[in-house]
């Protein structure tokens, strides 16, 4: 493992850096504290116990989410907390029938929300034409992602498991109707939250070495091919250890972007956004 500086890592976290890069060249030195330990131990949990969340969990996660940065203090996001089993069942059906959506006690739907400022403008008799432009949707999407990740880290720091659900974008109009969204709002993704089932543990999926993604002062991909090859091998080993089909990273990701059909309905996102009354000028 790379050299650790700063406060000693919490018990059980010593291998987090090694696990995150899974045999590839991990950083030789990093700073360390409990927050970094939580981040490096992140994993997507897809198996949950039928156990309720602690009291005030939702309020805690929302406070963490609201502590994220917000562009120009606009707060262009909302969250719909779904606990109703029937609604979760239907949302699971719209999202490739992912079982953990039904298993977890809480599903948070993260919403890019331009409706709040539209309503404010109407009440104050002020123009809001800026909301019609693509920039406003991009800002909403970024701020929504920042808020959600704060909530995700907060949940994991409490020992809870999480898993993002991008498949909420497979049928955005149906999802919006199901949870009663107004025009100019859209569920960008979901986040399930619950107690991980220790009988069906989730593993830490390796990430590419930092050299794959990191550029100093100017973009330079001279080492990209070699780094990608190393990551492909690391993913093959991970897939084998998980009993998954061993296809590596390159084949898997290229199949996800091969054509419109590979996007599982999301190829029509522009159309869906306009159906939801975003103008995107």
Image (cartoon, rainbow, N blue to C red):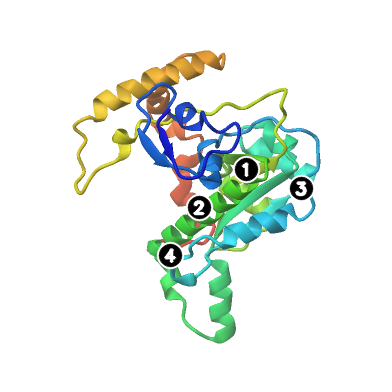
**Residue with the most extreme bottom position:** 125
Contact, CB < 8 Å: mark 4 with mark 2? Answer: no
* Upstream in sequence: badge 4 or badge 2: 4
Place of residue 111 in the rendered image (x, y in percent of width and height, measured from the top left): 57, 56
Above or below, comparing residue 106 to residue 224 in the picture: below
* Upstream in sequence: badge 2 or badge 1: 2
Distance of label 3 from label 1 (alpha carbons): 19 Å
Dot 2 corresponds to which residue? 145
Contact, CB < 8 Å: mark 3 with mark 2? Answer: no
Note whether residue 192 is visible. yes
* Upstream in sequence: badge 3 or badge 1: 3
Return the residue nearer the eye: 215 or 1: 1
* Upstream in sequence: badge 3 or badge 2: 3
Dot 3 corresponds to which residue? 83
Above or below, comparing residue 202 to residue 58 in the picture: above
Which circle, 2 or 1, is nearer the viewer?
A: 1
Query: Secondary structure under badge 1?
Result: helix
Return the residue nearer the eye: 26 or 236: 26
Dot 1 corresponds to which residue? 156
Mark 2 surroundings: few (<14), some (14-19) or many (≥20) residues within 10 A: many
Mark 3 surroundings: few (<14), some (14-19) or many (≥20) residues within 10 A: some
Distance of label 2 from label 1 (alpha carbons): 16 Å
Which circle, 4 or 3, is nearer the viewer?
A: 3
Quarter holding the C terminus?
Answer: bottom left
Place of residue 181 in the rendered image (x, y in percent of width and height, measured from the top left): 64, 59
């Amino acid at each position: 493992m790379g050299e650790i500086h700063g406060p000693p890592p919490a018990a059980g976290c010593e291998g987090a850096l090694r696990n995150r890069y899974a045999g590839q060249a991990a950083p030789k030195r990093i700073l360390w504290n409990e927050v970094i330990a939580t981040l490096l131990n992140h994993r997507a949990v897809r198996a949950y116990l039928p156990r309720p969340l602690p009291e005030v969990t939702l309020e805690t996660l929302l406070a963490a989410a609201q502590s994220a940065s917000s562009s120009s203090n606009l707060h262009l996001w909302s969250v719909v907390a779904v606990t109703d089993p029937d609604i979760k069942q239907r949302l699971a059906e719209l999202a490739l029938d992912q079982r953990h959506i039904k298993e977890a006690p809480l599903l948070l739907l993260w919403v890019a929300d331009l409706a709040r400022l539209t309503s404010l403008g109407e009440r104050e008799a002020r123009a809001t034409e800026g909301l019609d432009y693509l920039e406003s949707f991009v800002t909403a999407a970024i701020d929504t992602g920042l808020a959600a990740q704060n909530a995700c880290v907060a949940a994991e720091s409490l020992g809870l498991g999480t898993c993002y659900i991008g498949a909420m974008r497979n049928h955005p109009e149906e999802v919006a109707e199901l949870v009663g969204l107004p025009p100019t709002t859209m569920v960008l993704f979901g986040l399930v939250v619950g107690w991980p089932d220790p009988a069906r543990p989730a593993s830490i999926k390796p990430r590419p070495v930092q050299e794959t993604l990191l550029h100093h002062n100017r973009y330079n991909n001279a080492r990209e091919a070699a780094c990608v090859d190393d990551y492909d091998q690391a993913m093959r080993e991970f897939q084998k250890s998980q009993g998954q089909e061993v296809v590596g990273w390159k084949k898997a990701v290229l199949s996800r972007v091969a054509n419109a059909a590979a996007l599982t309905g999301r190829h029509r996102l522009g159309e869906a956004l306009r159906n939801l009354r975003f103008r995107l000028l």
